[in-house]
Image (cartoon, rainbow, N blue to C red):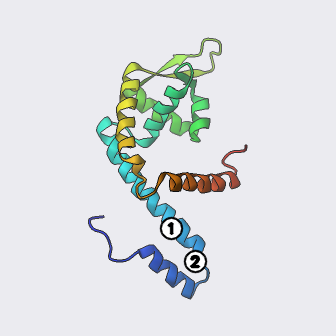
Amino acid sequence: MSRPLPFDPIARAAQLWEARIGPSETMAAVTGIMRVQQIIQSAVDGALKPHGLTFARYEALVLLTFARASHLPMRVMGERLQLHPTSVTNIVDRLEKDGLVKRVPHPTDRRTTLVEITDEGRVRREEATKAVTEIDFGLTGLTGKQTEQLTDLLTKVRKATGDFTE
């Protein structure tokens, strides 16, 4: 978008929704979330692009960095990233092509392939982390307390839909 609108189109849509359809709170909230997701995605993509990463590939590198042994089975990566196995395979294929991870055989289970972050992967993850943290992952305009509140509210929605149990 090249310039800001002189009005809030979501608030305007909510007024029209209210007048013509009914209660607009949920519609306005969801539309706002979807728009903020676009804003955040654009900011994060812009920060990661110079590092040759998408957010999905960045997340995979971070996950491998968090792993105790710097490697995980692809199945576990899919579970933790909440992705379909095909998506994990595509992410790993691209990271491997770029020299950021490597596939290694599991030492005790021939059916399992481990994905291990390389030294170059660690460097790239570190550089990319600096880039996304410098822009606060694209989430601007909130205080630290408000960001915590937002996280808590979104967590409630995720839990209510069965995203996780705890």
Q: Residue at x 26, y 65 (%)?
A: 2
- Residue 18 in percent (x, y) is at 56, 83
- Residue 159 in percent (x, y) is at 68, 51
Q: Which residue is mark 2?
A: 24
Left or right, 23 with reference to 87: right
Q: Residue at x 46, y 40 (%)?
A: 56
Q: Quadrant of residue 133?
A: top left
Q: Which residue is mark 1?
A: 31
Q: Of residues 94 and 160, which is closer to you in this image? A: 160
Amino acid tagged 1: Thr
Amino acid tagged 2: Ser
Answer yes or no: is residue 99 visible. no
The kind of secondary structure element at disc 2 is loop
- Residue 154 in percent (x, y) is at 59, 55
Q: CA distance from mark 1 to mark 2?
A: 10 Å
Q: Residue at x 49, y 26 (%)?
A: 65
